Image (tube, rainbow, N blue to C red):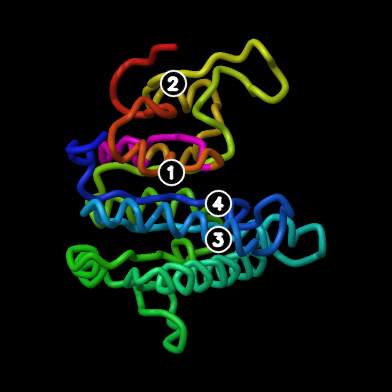
Amino acid sequence: MEGRRPRYRRVLLKLSGEVLAGKAGFGIDPSALMRLSREIKEVRDLGVQVAVVIGGGNIFRGLSGLEAGIDRATGDYMGMLATLINALALQSSLEKLGVPTRVMTPFEIRQLAEPYIRRRAIRHLEKGRVVIFAGGTGNPFFTTDTAAALRAAEIEADVILKATKVDGVYDKDPVKNKDAVRFKSINYIDVLDRGLKVMDSTAISLCMENSIPILVFSVVEPGNIKRVVMGEDVGTIVGEGGHAK
């Protein structure tokens, strides 16, 4: 890998809140947080511009609020605040490593984050700052997957790096089916037609309309963020081409 240049100039890394929870499955695990921060720093130090969209499922999910009698819109707003908690934790962890970081939100919360302004976000990236987009789209009924697709289109990211616990996209659930086969690449329409759980359909459609590839890979394996940025054969690429197993 020495001497090679990164494949991508500007990436949007989509992290689930559960990734920060580590083995506990809830809350924020300091060791998981620091490992992710080191991997993001490693990529940023290569000269790659890094934006991050983070979920809040380790703290609160909007849909789970329905079971507690909370209406969907209010539950979604609560979920947006959960993403801000994760974003602030990631910002603090990155800055301890000397990485300049900005948190931006679509709603106003001046004491904690900057308001999201597209041009300002791009300027931060150009200056080598990691930009964390918290708060989803700022609207209920939209997931952080959709927020990732929207922000990626706005900042003209080369790719969405969808970090998951699975090492790619399979033709069926690999946990339940030992004969499941991983796709090396697959097109957007096949993902939608097959109902594959890559991102929600709104996010996939946004990526398809704006020709933004989605690289699905396992973040559980240490060093994988750098590997995908360097163009190694890791995970599954969702794009405009055909698919192959």
Residue 213 falls within the magenta-colored stretch: yes
* Residue at x-position 43% and y-position 43%: 203
Locate residue 124, reporting x and y percent: 24, 69
Q: Which mark is residue 16?
A: 4
Q: Secondary structure at mark 2?
A: helix
Q: Nearer the viewer, residue 234 or 152?
A: 234
Work out whether mark 3 precedes mark 4 in sequence or the reverse, and give the earlier one.
Answer: 4
Q: Is residue 65 found inside the magenta-colored segment of the image?
A: no
Query: Which one is nearer the viewer's eye here, 193 or 128?
Result: 128
Question: Extreme bottom residue here?
Answer: 111
The magenta region covers 206-219
Q: Which residue is mark 2?
A: 190
Rate crowding at label 4 as few (under 14), some (14 to 19) or many (20 or more) other CA atoms within 10 Å.
many
Q: Is residue 169 left or right of residue 82?
A: left
Task: Identify residue for label 1.
Answer: 203
Give the x, y percent position of residue 19.
59, 51
User: Pointers 3 and 2 in contact (CB under 8 A)?
Assistant: no
Give whichever of discs 2 and 1 has the lower sequence position.
2
- Tag 1: amino acid: Ala
Q: Residues within 10 Å of mark 1 (few under 14, many from 20)?
A: many
- Alpha carbon separation for disc pair 3 and 2: 34 Å
